[in-house]
Amino acid sequence: MSGRVLVTGSSGFVGLHLCTHLESRGYEVFGCDQVAAENQTQRRVCDITDTTSVEEIVQWAAPVDFVVHLAAVTFVPEATRSPAQVVDVNLLGTIRLIDALRTQAPKARFVFIGSSEVYGSPQETPVTEEHDLSPENPYAISKAAADHYCRFRSQNDGMDIVRMRPFNHSGPGQPARFVLSSFARQIAEIEAGNRDPAIKVGNLEAVRDFTHVDDVVRAYTSALQDGRPGEAYNICSGESHRIGDALEALVAMADVEISIEVDPERLRPIDVPEIWGSHEKFTRDTGWRPSKSFETLLADLLGYWRGAV
């Protein structure tokens, strides 16, 4: 496989994994983010909230064959604190990028990275792509609106757009503000003697669908070639895991005794109790399916933080 790919959000957790994977598959990768990437060629700074900056980054990557749009405010509490910012980045940033492509690279395939958060509290599980979009927080609202805009441009203008709706994913390099990575980092710090032997947690009863980041970037790569224009796809493991059970599994891997303490600051005022999805549609169209187990995900995450601290 080959082609020129522009990846927005290339310096982020998933972006770094995706760029490495794409390059290993023979793609020529151009990355952009709000901060400069160290020791990387073909990477530039781009302000997704500035129309001129977005137009210039598309010109720089031209002639681009594919765009994977990862750049976003992704942390739900941050989005809740700054709803105007999250709309500017997640919705208007998507509009700016699509509009730049309409004039400069109208034949490029645009892979929009949305979120399973757009479904809100599911009416039934596993969640399929036919489920209504019912977002319940500013982050989800911004992603749902961007998803709808992508569908509009695909139907109205015939743009080649594929919409991805990833469920929770984790793995080496994920920031510690996300739940599994927070647990793993705290365990690594306790093992290293850098903190008291107690993990601070939020809601342990929530049930989520977690996919290893390596499987997620394989899915995004599959979408470049095999996703069907105009379609939306769930990217998920198809399995449900209680957060408390994930924590117990990580604690069982620890080398020291650890206690658990609930931190009220980590509890969300609105939290979907259970969501897990079906990847049947994407598997049918592309052949992709997750290959790494939840246990492998936890072990890789803990191993990463042991090395980092």
Image (cartoon, rainbow, N blue to C red):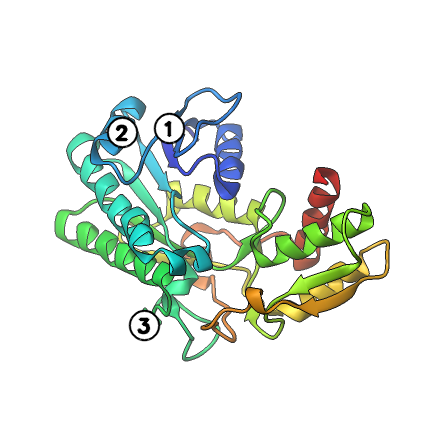
Q: Quadrant of residue 258?
A: bottom right
Q: Residue at x 44, y 45 (%)?
A: 220
| Mark 1 vs mark 3: in front | 1
The residue under label 2 is: 58
- Amino acid type of the residue that numbered disc 2 sits on in the rendered structure: Val
Q: Residue at x 35, y 72 (%)?
A: 131
Q: Are marks 1 and 2 in contact (CB under 8 Å)?
A: no
- In the rendered image, is residue 293 in sight? no
- Residue 132's tag is 3
> How far is disc 2 from disc 3 in space, using C-alphas?
33 Å
> How far is disc 1 from disc 2 in space, using C-alphas?
12 Å
Quarter of the image with the C terminus is top right
Percent position of residue 7, x then y: 39, 35
Q: Earlier in the sequence, mark 1 or mark 3?
A: 1
Q: Quadrant of residue 214?
A: top right
Q: Is residue 170 left or right of residue 141?
A: right
Per the image, label 2 sits on a secondary structure element best described as helix
Q: Dot 2 surroundings within 10 Å: few (below 14), some, or many (20 or more)?
A: many
| Mark 1 vs mark 2: in front | 1
- In the rendered image, is residue 17 in sight? yes
- Residue 45's tag is 1
Quarter of the image with the N terminus is top left
Question: Farthest residue toward the bottom?
Answer: 123
- Amino acid type of the residue that numbered disc 3 sits on in the rendered structure: Asp
Q: Earlier in the sequence, mark 2 or mark 3?
A: 2
> How far is disc 1 from disc 3 in space, using C-alphas?
36 Å
Nearer to the camera, 217 or 245: 245
Per the image, label 1 sits on a secondary structure element best described as strand
Percent position of residue 182, x then y: 63, 54
